[in-house]
Amino acid sequence: MDWLQLAEISTSQWATFGGLGVGAVVVAAVVMKSRGTKKKPLDFSDPQARLRHALTSGKTSFWNRLSATLSKNISEEALGALEQILVEADIGYETSNQLVQDMKKAFKAGKFTKHDELMVYLKAELKKRLGGDAPKLIKAKKGPTVILVVGVNGVGKTTSISKLAKFLAEQGGKVILSASDTFRAAAVDQLAKWAERLDLEIVRGQTGQKPDAVAFDAATKAVAKGFDYLIVDTAGRLHTQKNLMKELAKISRSISKVIDGAPHETILVIDANTGQNAVTQTEKFSEAAEVTGIFLTKLDGTPKGGIVVRIKEELSVPVKFVGLGEKPEDIAPFDADTFVDALFA
């Protein structure tokens, strides 16, 4: 606090400091002034606002390095230096190399000569590679839309299901959950607690019941009671566990006996920090369950974020939702414009 700010302390407030030394007066004034200047809480009612906040508040060495490199005099050498930075951001070698080669060609063609123009060009390229329009959930033409949720252990799958369920319910959808991770009683209990907290119906299997049988019962109930969405939890599994991967196919076949075209969405939950392993997981799970979209967790904590571009470029699987924290409301539909703009904010 400077002397101009001290002058703003009212006469009555100064009177309360009678008998104090100058140093004590300054300390007391600082305390009183700080009490009246609390920051207003941010309004995160808009999911995209949460996404922007998560990305911009977690500014990292990568994006700082990128900005620092682009702030120098633009030359082919400076553009070439970007490639390693992009690779380290998990964008991948092929995509990074292509981006840099395209930038060099554009620079030679005079499409940009200044730092700001280059930033605009790079942002536009990333948005184009991410597909432009925000990806939508695939919905059933008739009856409940079935969303099969898969992933390895430890990525936040159950929490992601709760976020997705809350998001869909807030959009006016009637949601039911299927606790088909019958290999772990704790997983069923955890999902049941989320269902109770969010006031959602859940179908739990009997001890020892097969996962596909639980999913079948849930699908039957979803149809009978007119639910809009059925979200099916599955056991966390490594993509190298062939028997467990086959179980996913059984669950899908079981649901399709009740609801045509189900599952309509197979969402793979991935930790944004896993790098190359995220690409491998997507490949292997797609072989077993035909992954249609990604739920990217822990995006608020990653020092990178480029994996979003890499998965879309290499596997043509869009990121549909991102997790931004631990609470059920910490979810945002993925939007390329918001994502890229926030990274460069």
Image (spheres, helix red, strand yellow):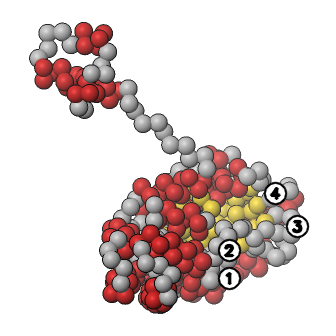
Tell me if I can see residue 296 in this picture. Answer: yes
Sequence-first disc among 4 and 3 = 3
Q: CA distance from mark 2 to mark 4?
A: 18 Å
User: At label 4, which amino acid type do we have?
Assistant: Phe
Q: Whole-percent x and y of residue 206?
A: 68, 62
The secondary element bearing badge 2 is classed as strand
Q: Note whether 70 is above or below 165 in the view shown.
A: below
Report how far apart the C-alphas of labels 4 and 1 lie in the structure: 24 Å
Distance between the alpha carbons at the discs numbered 1 and 2: 7 Å
The foreground one among 200 and 43 is 43
Say if mark 2 contacts mark 3, CB within 8 Å.
no
Q: Residue at x 63, y 87 (%)?
A: 287
Q: How far apart are labels 4 and 3 at the CA level?
A: 11 Å
* 52 left or right of 69 in image: right
Answer few, some or many: residues within 10 Å of disc 3's Cα (few below 14, many 20 plus, some between 14 and 19).
Answer: few
| Residue 300 badge | none
Label 4 sits on a secondary structure element that is: loop
Residue 290, numbered circle: 1
Q: Earlier in the sequence, mark 2 or mark 3?
A: 3
- Quarter containing the N terminus: top left
Q: According to the image, label 2 marks what residue? A: 266
Q: Which mark is residue 142?
A: 3
- Amino acid type of the residue tagged 1 in the rendering: Glu
Q: Amino acid at mark 3?
A: Lys
Above-or-below relation of 320 to 239: above
Instruction: State the image quarter where residue 303 is shown.
Output: bottom left
Total marks drawn?
4
Q: Residue at x 75, y 70 (%)?
A: 138
> Quarter-wise, where is residue 90 in the image?
bottom left
